[in-house]
């Protein structure tokens, strides 16, 4: 490689590469031409391109200088040999004496033992590893910084070409990026299965020309775009309503945006022949690879900031906003890194499914997906890098699995699964008007959980006997301002009317923890789930609570009203909440508004402490609803949002059931109506166990009512109870196996 390569040499090479892209050649021919061009242009004996076959295996796809017979034969695992190491770290390897380099793997079929010096650079686009570009020479020499840089520039152009599908052949023998089937194993956000086409919430920016025709023009473009970016970040920082964390993130953005080194490096890339867009991506990839090596967790977290910032810059440069003008496909499945509840609601029922890279089961997006009955998979790692708009996708919300661009056989068996589910739905709807009554004649009341207007149609369709939990905070969360009393009254009225005389238990605002209102000052708490949330906020700042209670009274317009307070931890909190309710009732009456003909005031039992409250509490509460999601997290001290610990403790754990049974006994002693409204009530086996230990009211998402009812109607509850008791006295940790065996023996 001649040391005195100039920018114009580099630009000439890039232009020749681009011309290859413009030809009608097959992918393999293009790769062959490219390796020839690079070796010729930069004067090395060998130039080879290795591309990923799958996430873990690299394959020699083209070479100039090594034995041709090795092409598509030589493969290595990620991290294996020098090539594998470049791919793994995303950093170049430059050595004058490759065979004595640590990790060198001898590949006799290539004939590479003739070549002493080795320079390998990653072919990567943003965080996506695509392959490795290698040059080798016989003479023992290390390549200069300039030469490494020149090869990185070439690799960047190759990455963009790969992204544009330039190397795919009909036979798919070479790195078929974004074409192969990929399986993602995530977690269940919402059960159900669907087949559809990918719709990216934030579409990838497509760079159609990685090579600069006019470097001066590209220079102006990048400077101007960085200027726009800086102003936009400064504007964001000037916003008043930022919390400490948001501020810290934006400060980091500003630091990157104003970094002179960043702009200078991009300018150098452009001088070497890259377009402004390709320069942004090159620096993004390089910084990523460097930061990924850093052991410091804080710095690694900043990767996300850097990505966001680079993406913003790319959008400014390409003019590709979120709305690219692309047509939403039929049966769209939303694919995103994460999404807020309001954005998800905006898409509404148009969506067939949702797949997120992040998210959590207890998040509001998950609650919205549940309300809309849309299958959802969370924690599908890196799917936004793989998926392209319009790709075929299968979402299995039950298993938390996603098939992207599935093989025909997979798609066929998946369709069978969907058909079976549809059949089950038919069965459930035939049960809709029948009671959930067990074989031994015990009737269990099944109600539904709701929180959005979108839930209301399910009241009719599901056969719910009422709304056992109406989460009022969702209406607060999906707005960008505090709703007014009249707005709320109208809304609650619609809910009451849609229920057509069936009871609705309105839960007052449960904010805090993960539910942060965009228009309220966020609290900086070390442990928000156990922090200032729910009724604690309501009692400390009663203005909103009182406004909400007034809205509820007005909405009832004289009809019966049921109100419950969330997260009550002690009798005193219930007393205080209740007296707010009574005071508002009195006030409304004195203002001449009609008051509910019957008012029920209940509490949610979500902390173990309330189970041990004095008898007076149980006597005073008109009803109690077990918020099993929270109760379980506090019983086991296992965060409901932390996937790792959440699944560790079974709801049918014998100790937890004993505890629930204790609550049942306390309510029975005071004759207080008790229901269970956590997510577990909607799982058929759990529902059987709850009924067996004495719960008579369960509230769940509408789609669960059918399956739960079907099972309850098939079983003998006294037998279920004795199965539980036998397993418990035998010392079982969880009674699940005993219950499932018992059901299986009956062919259920
Ligand atoms: C619960 O904790 O079980 C509950 C129903 O309330 P949320 O899920 O809204 O916290
Ligand atoms: Mg709760």
Image: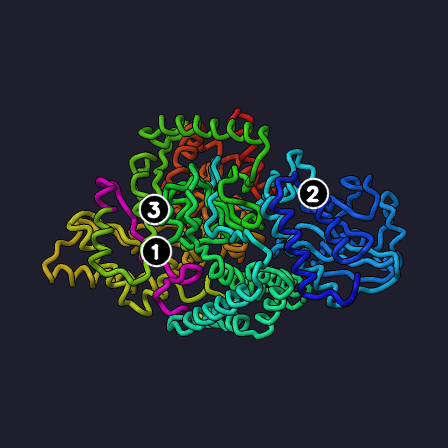
What distance separates the C-alpha of mark 1 from that of mark 3? 14 Å
Could you tell me if residue 32 is visible in this image? yes
Question: What residue did someone put label 1 on?
Answer: 478
Q: Would residue 616 be visible to someone looking at this image? A: no
Q: Where does the image place residue 46, in percent across and percent down from the top left? A: 81, 52
Write down which quadrant ligand 2 falls in.
bottom left
- Specify the quadrant of the image occupied by residue 549: bottom left
Q: Label 3, secondary structure: give it.
A: strand
The picture places residue 446, in percent across and down from the top left corner, at 35, 38
Dot 1 crowding, Cα within 10 Å, few <14, some 14–19, many 20+: some
User: Mark 2 sits on what residue?
Assistant: 53
Residue 280 located left or right of residue 592: right
Q: Quadrant of residue 520?
A: bottom left
- Counting from the top left corner in percent of width and height, residue 695 is at 40, 42
| Position of residue 552 measured from the top left corner of the image (x, y, whole percent) | 23, 55
In the rendered image, which quarter contains the N terminus? Answer: bottom right
Q: Which residues are magenta?
A: 495-522
| Relative height, residue 717 to residue 650 (above, below) | above
Residue at numbered disc 3: 450
Q: CA distance from mark 1 to mark 2?
A: 44 Å
Mark number displayed over residue 666: none
Q: Nearer the viewer, residue 32 or 380?
A: 32
């Amino acid at each position: 490689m001649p040391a005195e390569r100039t920018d114009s040499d580099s630009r000439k090479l890039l232009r020749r590469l681009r011309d290859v892209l413009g030809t009608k050649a097959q992918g393999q021919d293009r790769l062959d031409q490219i390796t020839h061009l690079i070796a010729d242009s930069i004067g090395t004996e060998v130039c080879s391109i290795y591309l990923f076959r799958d996430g873990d295996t690299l394959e020699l796809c083209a070479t100039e200088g090594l034995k041709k017979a090795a092409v598509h034969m030589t493969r290595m695992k990620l991290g294996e040999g020098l090539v594998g190491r470049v791919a793994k770290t995303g950093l170049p390897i430059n050595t004058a004496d490759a065979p004595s380099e640590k990790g060198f793997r001898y590949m006799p079929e290539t004939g590479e033992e003739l070549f002493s010096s080795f320079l390998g650079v990653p072919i990567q686009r943003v965080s996506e590893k695509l392959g490795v570009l290698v040059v080798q020479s016989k003479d023992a020499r290390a390549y200069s910084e300039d030469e490494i840089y020149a090869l990185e520039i070439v690799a960047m152009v190759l990455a963009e070409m790969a992204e544009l599908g330039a190397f795919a052949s009909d036979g798919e023998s070479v790195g078929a990026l974004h074409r192969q089937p990929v399986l993602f194993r995530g977690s269940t956000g919402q059960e159900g299965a669907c087949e559809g086409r990918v719709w990216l919430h934030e579409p990838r920016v497509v760079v159609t020309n990685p090579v600069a025709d006019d470097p001066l023009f590209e220079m102006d473009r990048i400077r101007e775009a960085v200027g726009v970016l800086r102003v936009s970040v400064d504007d964001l920082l000037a916003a008043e309503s930022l919390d400490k964390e948001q501020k810290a993130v934006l400060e980091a953005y500003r630091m990157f945006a104003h970094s002179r080194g960043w702009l200078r490096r991009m300018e150098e890339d452009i001088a070497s022949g890259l377009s402004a867009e390709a320069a942004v991506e090159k620096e993004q990839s390089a910084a990523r690879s460097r930061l990924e090596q850093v052991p410091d967790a804080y710095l690694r977290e900043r990767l996300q900031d850097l990505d966001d910032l680079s993406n913003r810059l790319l959008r400014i440069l390409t003019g590709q906003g979120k709305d690219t003008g692309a047509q939403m496909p039929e049966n769209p499945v939303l694919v995103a890194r994460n999404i807020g509840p309001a954005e998800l609601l905006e898409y509404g029922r148009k969506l067939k499914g949702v797949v997120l890279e992040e998210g959590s089961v207890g998040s509001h997006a998950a609650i919205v997906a549940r309300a809309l009955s849309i299958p959802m998979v969370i924690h599908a790692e890196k799917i936004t890098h793989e998926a392209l708009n319009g790709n075929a996708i299968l979402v299995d919300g039950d298993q938390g699995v996603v098939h992207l661009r599935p093989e025909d056989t997979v798609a066929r068996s998946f369709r069978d699964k969907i058909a079976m589910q549809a059949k089950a739905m038919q069965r459930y709807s035939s049960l809709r008007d029948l009671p959930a009554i067990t074989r031994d004649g015990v009737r269990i009341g099944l109600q539904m959980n709701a929180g959005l207007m979108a839930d209301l149609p399910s009241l009719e369709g599901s056969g719910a006997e009422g709304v056992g939990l109406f989460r009022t905070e969702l209406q607060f969360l999906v707005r960008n301002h505090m709703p007014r009393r009249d707005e709320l009254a109208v809304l609650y009225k619609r809910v009451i009317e849609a229920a057509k005389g069936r009871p609705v238990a309105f839960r007052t605002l449960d904010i805090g923890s993960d539910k942060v209102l965009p228009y309220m000052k966020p609290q900086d708490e070390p442990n928000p789930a156990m922090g200032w949330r729910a009724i604690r906020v309501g009692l400390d700042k009663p203005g909103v609570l009182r406004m909400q209670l007034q809205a509820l009274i007005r909405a009832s317009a004289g009809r019966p009203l049921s109100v419950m307070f969330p997260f009550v931890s002690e009798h005193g909190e219930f007393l205080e909440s209740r007296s707010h309710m009574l005071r508002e009732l009195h006030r409304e009456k004195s203002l001449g508004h009609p008051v509910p003909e019957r008012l029920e005031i209940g509490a949610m039992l979500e902390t173990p402490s309330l189970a041990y409250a004095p008898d007076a509490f149980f006597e005073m509460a008109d009803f109690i609803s077990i918020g099993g999601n929270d109760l379980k997290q506090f019983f086991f001290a296992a965060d409901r949002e932390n996937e790792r610990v959440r699944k560790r403790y079974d709801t049918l754990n014998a100790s937890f059931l004993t505890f629930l049974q204790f609550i049942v006994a306390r309510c029975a002693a005071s004759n207080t109506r008790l229901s269970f409204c956590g997510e577990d009530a909607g799982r058929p086996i759990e529902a059987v166990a709850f009924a067996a230990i004495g719960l008579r009211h369960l509230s769940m998402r509408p789609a669960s009512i059918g399956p739960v009812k079907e099972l309850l109607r098939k079983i003998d509850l006294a037998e279920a109870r004795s199965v539980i008791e036998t397993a418990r006295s035998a010392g079982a940790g969880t009674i699940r196996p005993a219950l499932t065996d018992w059901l299986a023996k009956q062919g259920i």
